[in-house]
Image: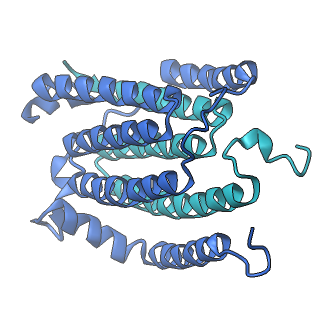
């Protein structure tokens, strides 16, 4: 089985789309956060594939930065989750409607 | 992977290619399970296995250091944080009545809006046939070292300023998380 960059792009796109669908259709705030992590992971997959394709280490270094951002985003998101749960006793994103959005 | 030079543009051949297929299909299945699982704990565990499978793909791609960081930071750090929060906010007896919102149409429209340019690029773009140079991932100053050393060489020499900015970002995220998570003294419910 010969794998080219296109296979990586397809896998990465599917992973990103699954994450995007999860962000848009799930009600549970925690699952929305997990879907965001899936999307970031799909981006990492692309960076690594192109790093290998172009024989350039920059992609690997950049994906380390993406993992750093993902860690910070998870920490903030989970703090928001706890804050939301404390105020509303729920994790449903449709109940967080103070601003009538 | 020694036969990668035979076909121009081939990243993985032979058994490594099949391993990639297995890892990718399993990772996608786990990702779907993350989105459709009703229980957040199940979602978190599926997400964990998806991360581990993607780390396996990274290691297949000569990115051993990033694979290790993926396992340490995602599987070790972020997932433990997720599981802690799930257990903090988990209410026994309160079941989620509806798992999904009623906006499938908008969501599918968004995915379609991504799909069309993606397919266009996939079919029209011909990536240049550069010679594959696997030593680029483990060479430091002309000598064969390791992937970790090579990444460190690029990270600390060419990307020192972004590295420092990332440390400031982590500090800001930590302070933000502490402030957001702090129970305010006057609003104890």
Q: Which residue is at 42% across, 36% downward?
A: B42
Q: Position of residue B76 (x, y in %)?
A: 32, 58
Q: Residue furthest front?
A: B93
Is B84 drawn above or below residue B93 in the view shown?
below
Q: Is residue B82 in view from this perspective?
A: yes
User: In the picture, residue B19 is in which quadrant?
Assistant: top left
Nearer to me, B125 or A94? A94
Q: Position of residue B162 (x, y in %)?
A: 49, 72
Nearer to me, A40 or B16? A40
Q: Residue furthest right?
A: A100
Q: Which residue is at 52% across, 34% downward?
A: A16
Q: Please state if A11 lies on the left or on the right of A87 as rendered.
A: left
Q: Position of residue B141 (x, y in %)?
A: 18, 71
Quarter of the image with the N terminus of chain B in it: top left
Is B51 drawn above or below residue B14 in the view shown?
below
Q: Which residue is at 21% across, 53% downward?
A: B64
Q: Is residue A9 in view from this perspective?
A: no
Tell how many labels.
Answer: 0
Quarter of the image with the C terminus of chain B in it: bottom right
Nearer to me, A66 or A89? A89
User: In the picture, residue B10 is in which quadrant?
Assistant: top left
User: In the picture, residue A49 is in which quadrant?
Assistant: top left
Q: Please state if B66 lies on the left or on the right of A59 as rendered.
A: left
Question: Which colour is chain B painted?
Answer: blue
Is B25 drawn above or below residue B155 in the view shown?
above
- Report the chain shown in cyan: A
Q: Position of residue B80 (x, y in %)?
A: 38, 57
Q: Which residue is at 50% across, 18% downward?
A: B123
Instruction: Indicate how the structure is coloured in the image.
Output: by chain
Q: Please state if B66 lies on the left or on the right of A78 as rendered.
A: left
Nearer to me, B103 or B110? B103
């Amino acid at each position: 089985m010969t794998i080219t960059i296109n296979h990586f792009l397809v896998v990465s796109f599917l992973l990103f789309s699954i994450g995007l669908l999860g962000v848009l259709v799930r009600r549970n705030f925690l699952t929305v956060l997990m879907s965001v992590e899936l999307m970031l992971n799909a981006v990492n997959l692309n960076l690594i594939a192109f790093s290998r394709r172009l024989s350039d280490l920059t992609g690997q270094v950049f994906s380390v930065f993406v993992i750093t951002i993902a860690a910070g985003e998870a920490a903030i998101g989970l703090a928001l989750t706890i804050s939301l749960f404390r105020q509303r006793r729920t994790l449903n994103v449709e109940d967080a409607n103070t601003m009538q959005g | 992977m020694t036969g990668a030079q035979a076909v121009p543009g081939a990243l993985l051949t032979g058994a490594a290619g099949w391993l990639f297929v297995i890892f990718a299909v399993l990772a996608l299945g786990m990702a779907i399970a993350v989105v459709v699982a009703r229980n957040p704990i199940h979602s978190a565990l599926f997400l964990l296995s998806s991360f581990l499978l993607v780390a396996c793909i990274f290691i297949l791609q000569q990115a051993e250091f990033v694979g290790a960081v993926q396992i340490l930071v995602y599987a070790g750090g972020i997932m433990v944080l997720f599981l802690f929060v799930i257990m903090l906010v988990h209410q026994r007896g309160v079941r989620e009545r509806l798992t999904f919102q009623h906006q499938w149409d908008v969501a599918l429209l968004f995915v379609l809006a991504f799909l069309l340019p993606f397919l266009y690029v996939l079919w029209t773009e011909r990536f240049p046939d550069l010679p594959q140079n696997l030593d680029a991932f483990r060479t430091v100053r002309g000598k064969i070292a390791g992937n970790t050393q090579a990444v460190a060489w690029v990270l600390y020499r060419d990307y020192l300023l972004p590295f420092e900015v990332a440390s400031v970002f982590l500090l800001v995220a930590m302070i933000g998380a502490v402030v957001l998570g702090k129970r305010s003294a006057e609003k104890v419910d």
